[in-house]
Amino acid sequence: MSDAPSRSSDDHDPSYIQVHELSKIYSRTDGAVHALQGVTLTVARGEIVGLMGPSGSGKSTLLNLIGGLDRPTEGRVVVEATDISKLSADSLALYRREKVGFVFQDARLIPALTVYENVMLPLVPMQMPDDEKRSRVEMSLEECNITHRAQHLPGELSGGEQQRTAVARAMVNDPHIILADEPTGELDPENAARIVDLLRQINRDGRTVLVASHDANAMAQMPRLIKIREGQLEDGQA
Ligand SMILES: Nc1ncnc2c1ncn2[C@@H]1O[C@H](COP(=O)(O)OP(=O)(O)OP(=O)(O)O)[C@@H](O)[C@H]1O
Ligand SMILES: [Mg+2]
């Protein structure tokens, strides 16, 4: 994609995302849940990383903290040299909007809007000429190979097409980081492989990508795999 952030070797940053001694405790009526327990991890700029672990191991919690959807109980998340755990609510919202694109297991498209309109959504609040918004949407649809469905409603799409639309929406604001949480969870193996290929393509275009999954087949394609269990990384994975 022509307007993807270009990354020369000068841009190499081995500690682009730094997660330091991160803990998250959820308080519930039936007691406290230690979802993450002192996780330390570094991701280089332009890397693609698979995060693998059983259900309840803390994958979504970790992605949500890196994406600024939630705040840690203890520890830090530093992205592009900014400690996002210290940001005000407004600055954190800006970080989410400008730096990060999210893809979830269920595509979370708005049923009453077309594919085109769903992909346009993140651009609505942005200060940018309408022409540019349209051309960004078209480029995202193109890259995710879903242009032929632009005027369809989500309910008229297959699961794989819905998920490709969700990836297009995640990319449309040109984020540096893509966080995908079980993006293949509801897909058959063929469509799952297409989504993994698409995420790898997006990574080759210069974005840093984190994919959480317990799908061993999908994760087999990841050049780097981090394993998590009961809120802790397996040894030697920082
Ligand atoms: N909002 C919440 N409130 C209370 N407990 C939570 C909350 N979110 C997650 N948990 C608990 O924290 C632990 C880690 O959950 P998390 O969703 O991060 O796991 P996961 O690895 O993403 O699992 P899955 O593969 O099922 O998606 C689990 O025990 C879960 O029940
Ligand atoms: Mg999860």
Image (tube, rainbow, N blue to C red):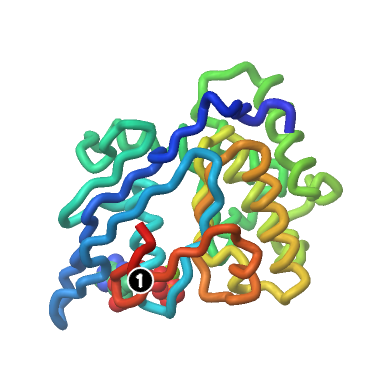
Q: Residue furthest bottom?
A: 30
Q: Which of 140 and 226 is in front in this view?
A: 226
* Amino acid on which the number 1 mark rests in the picture: Glu
The quadrant of the picture showing ligand 1 is bottom left
When asked about the image quadrant of residue 207, the answer is top right
Q: Which residue is drawn at 51% across and 64% down?
A: 225
**Against 189, is 168 above or below?**
above
Q: Which of 238 and 74 is in front in this view?
A: 238
In the displayed structure, does residue 1 sit left or right of residue 180? right
**Against 192, is 197 above or below?**
above
Residue 209 image position (x, y, % from top left)? 54, 49
Residue 160 image position (x, y, % from top left)? 73, 64
Mark 1 residue CB less than 8 A from any atom of ligand 1 = no
Residue 210 image position (x, y, % from top left)? 50, 54
Q: How crowded is mark 1: few (under 14 residues within 10 Å), some or many (20 or more)?
A: some
Q: Nearer the viewer, residue 185 or 16?
A: 16
Q: Can residue 162 be seen in this view?
A: no
Q: Which residue lies furthest to the right in this view?
A: 148
Residue 20 image position (x, y, % from top left)? 25, 50
The N terminus is located in which quarter?
A: top right
Q: Is residue 54 visible?
A: yes
Q: Residue at x 29, y 45 (%)?
A: 77
In the displayed structure, does residue 146 sit left or right of residue 12? right
**Against 37, is 68 above or below?**
above
When asked about the image quadrant of residue 28, the answer is bottom left
Residue of label 1: 234
Q: Is mark 1 on a helix, strand or loop?
A: loop
Q: How many numbered markers are drawn?
A: 1
**Against 68, is 173 above or below?**
above
In the displayed structure, does residue 69 sit left or right of residue 25? right
Q: Residue at x 29, y 71 (%)?
A: 231
The C terminus is located in which quarter?
A: bottom left
